[in-house]
Image (cartoon, helix red, strand yellow):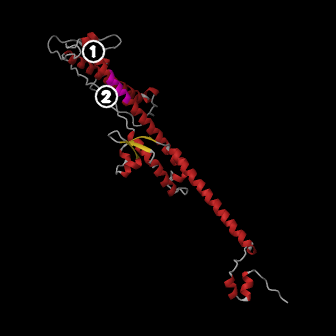
Amino acid sequence: MAEEVANAVNDSAVQDTATAEPAPVEEKQLEVVTEGPAVDARQFQTEEEGPAEDVADDTAEPEAAADTEEPQDEKPLAPKSENRFQKLANENRELKQQLAQLTAQEAQVAQEQELLNEINPETGDYFTPAEAERLARHQYLQTQQQNLAQQSSQLAVQQTQIQLANEASQVVNEVPLLREFNQDGSKNPEYNPEVAAEYNEALGDSLLYQLPDGKVYTANTLIANGINPETQVLVGAYNSPLKLAKLAAKAYQTAAVTAQIKGQKATEKMLSQADNPSSSKPAKASSKDEAQMSPEEYAKAHGLKEVWQ
């Protein structure tokens, strides 16, 4: 689920861009004067321009470029040219902010005009210009406060999404037990599907998604109700994904070491019993069984040895 977290974040953090269209340029046409005496162009000629005969004919065809001419290498862009897209983006953002402010001011003025035609319930008379301005200003500030709070909330969510995406990448890189495939596409021999399943379950109980109605649920809760968490907005997590991954890896390693120690102790006990078979005493038979035993069985049951004469 660590990779799914990164994908969900990338889908949620989409920025709006707007391109300002240039204003159409009005084409001006020259008016041709057909009346009056003919004008000699030589009277407008200056000494630096030289005689009129030296002026190149516009109708003459340009000389063909030489075939042996080599193309010139492209020059690297100047720093100003390299940053022009960033400057355009900043200018576009500033224009959007200015437009939003102008729109809000326009709404405030329109509200003031409407209030001038309404009666103030406190005085019983029409709103004065000062009262209308004060009331419209108050409502304008309330609207601005709500917009700022909404923008602040959106920025906080985006910051959380970026942090979760970074941690999801760290999980894949730093915890081999949870990485099924390597970067080259090969199978990771250290991958443990059982540990990965436990981690995904814990992560599903930690990640928080917000529905369009504003309610927030964990990923596992949404899945249990048939809702795909990736289609909702990721807004936070109870626990750090990277911390959960490291805890899962540590628990697995601890369990593996404990099982290894227990197995080693059991092996050592078996080996010690095999080396000392005489240390184990046979079970003592009951009196009823002894009566039915032969002398050889009785001696074997009590660990007696035969004495040869």
* Horizontal relation, residue 218 to residue 299: left or right: left
* Horizontal relation, residue 66 to residue 110: left or right: right
Residue 263 to residue 35: above or below? below
Find out whether the residues at labels 1 and 2 contact each other: C-beta distance under 8 Å: no
Residue at 33% in and 23% down: 142
Residue nearer the viewer, 279 or 22:
279
Look at the image and say whether residue 41 sits in the magenta stretch.
no
Residue 238 to residue 75: above or below? below
Q: Position of residue 176 (x, y in %)?
A: 54, 52
Magenta region, residue range: 141-149
Which residue, as the protein is rendered here, is positioned at the far right? 309
Q: Amino acid at mark 1?
A: Glu
Residue at 29% in and 15% down: 134
Residue nearer the viewer, 106 or 207:
207
Quarter of the figure with residue 274: bottom right
Q: Is residue 69 visible?
A: no
Q: Which residue is mark 2?
A: 20
Q: Amino acid at mark 2?
A: Ala
Residue at 40% in and 44% down: 8
Residue at 41% in and 47% down: 219
* Other residues around mark 1 within 10 Å, as few (<14) / some (14–19) / many (≥20): some
* Other residues around mark 2 within 10 Å, as few (<14) / some (14–19) / many (≥20): few
Residue 142 to residue 228: above or below? above
Quarter of the figure with residue 151: top left
The dot on residue 133 is 1
Q: Main secondary structure of the magenta part?
A: helix
Q: Position of residue 50 (x, y in %)?
A: 33, 14
Q: Position of residue 91 (x, y in %)?
A: 37, 25
The mark nearer the N terminus, 1 or 2, is: 2
